[in-house]
Image (cartoon, rainbow, N blue to C red):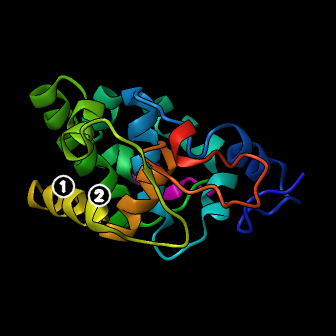
């Protein structure tokens, strides 16, 4: 089966992610938080590296329970920094907690984080390939950073929007490609 050129077909976790999740519209706030945190940990690394540690992140981050993450203290940060199964970067760990608090504030303001994202898109899916940023990711990134999020640059937000199906980027040669009017 032909997949997008970036998908390492030798890695079952990667192919499963590509085939079943990536580019699929998802409005669940727990999932959105998970993807936002994981994408922020990707900065400077490969998505494959993060994906290979995803189960460990789920365990370490209490299955991405928003309220629990928002209440993490110095003791929990120290625990995360000692966890050899995740990416142990103090700046990224601190940012993940900070960003969860901002995520919760946005969720409270808009009813859900998904509703917030849709204020930028009017609920529409954007189809494009071979890009790492666009006007949408620039705008969302700018607003999130204005609110205080860290590791929320336009490239990270673009990847996040691809992951949750707001930006649809399956390549035309990929078996999962759908024309823009069929998304």
**Quick one: which residue is furthest to the front in this view?**
181
Q: What stretch is highlighted in magenta?
A: 78-84
Q: How far apart are marks 1 and 2 (CA)?
A: 12 Å
Q: In this view, does 154 lie to the left or right of 163?
A: left
Q: Position of residue 47 (x, y in %)?
A: 60, 63
Where, quadrant-wise, is the C terminus in this rendering?
A: top right
Q: Mark 1 points at which residue?
A: 144
Q: Mark 2 points at which residue?
A: 95
| Residue drawn at (46%, 59%) of the image | 159
**Quick one: which residue is furthest to the top in this view?**
111
Q: Where is residue 166 in the image (x, y as percent from the top left)?
A: 42, 45
Q: Main secondary structure of the magenta part?
A: helix
Neighbourhood count class around disc 2 (C-alpha, 10 Å): few under 14, some 14–19, many 20 upward: many
Tell me how many marks there are. Answer: 2
Q: Where is residue 85 in the image (x, y as percent from the top left)?
A: 64, 53
- Determine whether 65 is above or below 11 in the image: above
Does the image show residue 183? no
- Element under disc 1: helix
Neighbourhood count class around disc 1 (C-alpha, 10 Å): few under 14, some 14–19, many 20 upward: many
| Residue drawn at (16%, 64%) of the image | 142
Q: Where is residue 181 in the image (x, y as percent from the top left)?
A: 52, 41
Query: Looking at the image, which is closer to me, 70 or 42?
Result: 42
Q: In this view, does 119 lie to the left or right of 151?
A: left
Query: Looking at the image, which is closer to me, 138 or 151?
Result: 138
| In front: label 1 or label 2 | 1
- Determine whether 84 is above or below 16 in the image: below
| Residue drawn at (64%, 53%) of the image | 51
Does the image show residue 116? yes
Magenta stretch holds residue 183: no
């Amino acid at each position: 089966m032909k997949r997008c050129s970036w998908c390492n077909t030798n890695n079952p976790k990667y192919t499963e992610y590509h085939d079943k999740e990536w580019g699929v519209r998802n409005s669940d706030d727990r999932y959105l938080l998970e993807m936002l945190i994981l994408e922020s940990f990707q900065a400077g690394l490969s998505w494959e590296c993060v994906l290979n540690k995803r189960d460990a992140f789920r365990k370490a981050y209490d299955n991405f329970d928003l309220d629990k993450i928002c209440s993490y203290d110095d003791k929990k940060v120290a625990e995360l920094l000692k966890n050899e199964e995740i990416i142990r970067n103090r700046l990224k760990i601190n940012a993940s907690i900070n960003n969860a608090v901002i995520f919760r504030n946005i969720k409270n303001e808009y009813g859900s984080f998904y509703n917030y994202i849709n204020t930028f898109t009017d609920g529409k899916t954007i189809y494009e390939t071979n890009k790492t940023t666009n006007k949408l990711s620039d705008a969302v990134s700018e607003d999130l950073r204005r609110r205080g999020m860290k590791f929320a640059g336009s490239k990270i937000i673009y990847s996040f929007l691809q992951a949750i199906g707001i930006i649809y980027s399956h390549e035309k040669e990929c078996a999962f490609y759908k024309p823009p009017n069929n998304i």
